[in-house]
Image (spheres, helix red, strand yellow):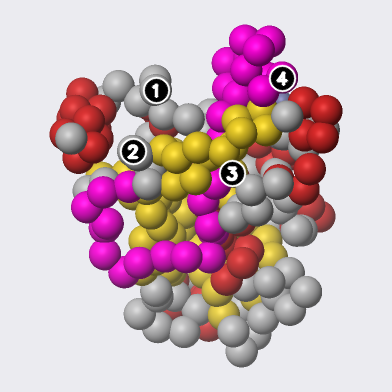
Amino acid sequence: MIDDALRAIVSSGDYGSLVPVLPTTDTTLGGSCPRGHDFRIARVSLGHSHLYDATTVTCEVCRELGHEHSTWALIDPFTHTAEPPGRGLALVVTPPSVRGGLGQIAVYLGPRSVADADLMICAPCRRAVLEQIRVDPGCRRRGLGRLLVAASVMRAPSDRYRWSTTPVNNDPEVLAFWSRIPFPAPSTLGTPEYCSDMRTAAGIAE
Ligand SMILES: [Zn+2]
Ligand SMILES: [Zn+2]
């Protein structure tokens, strides 16, 4: 039943019913919804997304005001699998084959990849570079990009790794994305700082 519903959405490409995701397992969300409504006043209810196979929180004020989104699915950015999950929403991590090489974190909805991030992490050099984030057009504005950044940064914590990204264009929507999410290194956003291992792995000239 659930798998049929998922298969129907994935095969039709109709992602309109997908609730947005939040990269957390904290069902209190720190006490307020993403619009800032304090749950002690706004009230919150918990539920379950069968499509994502994940816990959801609904802000009752957002719901009663008829906001486009009032329910968020909670996805743990640290939990991942090596293979597509078959059902539910899951992160699938493909580690790099060599030190400093390109790895990938993908968001799968059932058998299908709907978003992914390419990144280089070099543990000995304590460097991490986000190369690219891609989200299926039909799945945008659902928090998947934010989830991928959170999942990336968790794997190379910013107190130990120096983060940067490949060039970011000045499109307002792109800047809106980066300015809204907790990226740990605003000063090196758009200025990749590769270590020698990454340069070797990717064949980038010094
Ligand atoms: Zn709210
Ligand atoms: Zn290195």
Q: Amino acid at mark 1?
A: Ser
- Crowd tier of the residue under label 4, counting other residues whose Cα lies within 10 Å: few below 14, some 14–19, many 20 or above: some
How far separated are the C-alphas under marks 1 and 2? 10 Å
Q: Earlier in the sequence, mark 2 or mark 4?
A: 2
Q: Earlier in the sequence, mark 3 or mark 1?
A: 1
Q: Secondary structure at mark 3?
A: strand
Indicate the quadrant containing the C terminus: top left, top right, bottom left or bottom right.
bottom right
Residue 33 or residue 185, whichever sits in front: 33
Q: Position of residue 148 (x, y in %)?
A: 53, 52
Q: Disc 1 marks which residue?
A: 17
Q: Residue at x 77, y 26 (%)?
A: 42
Amino acid type shown at disc 2: Leu
With respect to residue 42, does 99 lie above or below?
below
Horizontal relation, residue 24 to residue 112: left or right: right
Q: Give the main secondary structure of the magenta stretch.
A: loop
Kindly state the secondary structure of the residue where label 2 is placed.
loop
Give the mark nearest the N terminus, 1 or 4: 1
The answer to whether residue 77 shows anywhere in this view is: yes
Task: Please determine whether, in this image, residue 28 is positioned above or below residue 203.
Answer: above
Query: Relative to residue 1, is residue 107 drawn left or right?
Result: right
Q: Amino acid at mark 3?
A: Leu
Residue 51 tag number: 2
Foreground tag (3 vs 4): 4
Numbered badge on residue 22: 3
The residue wearing badge 4 is 61
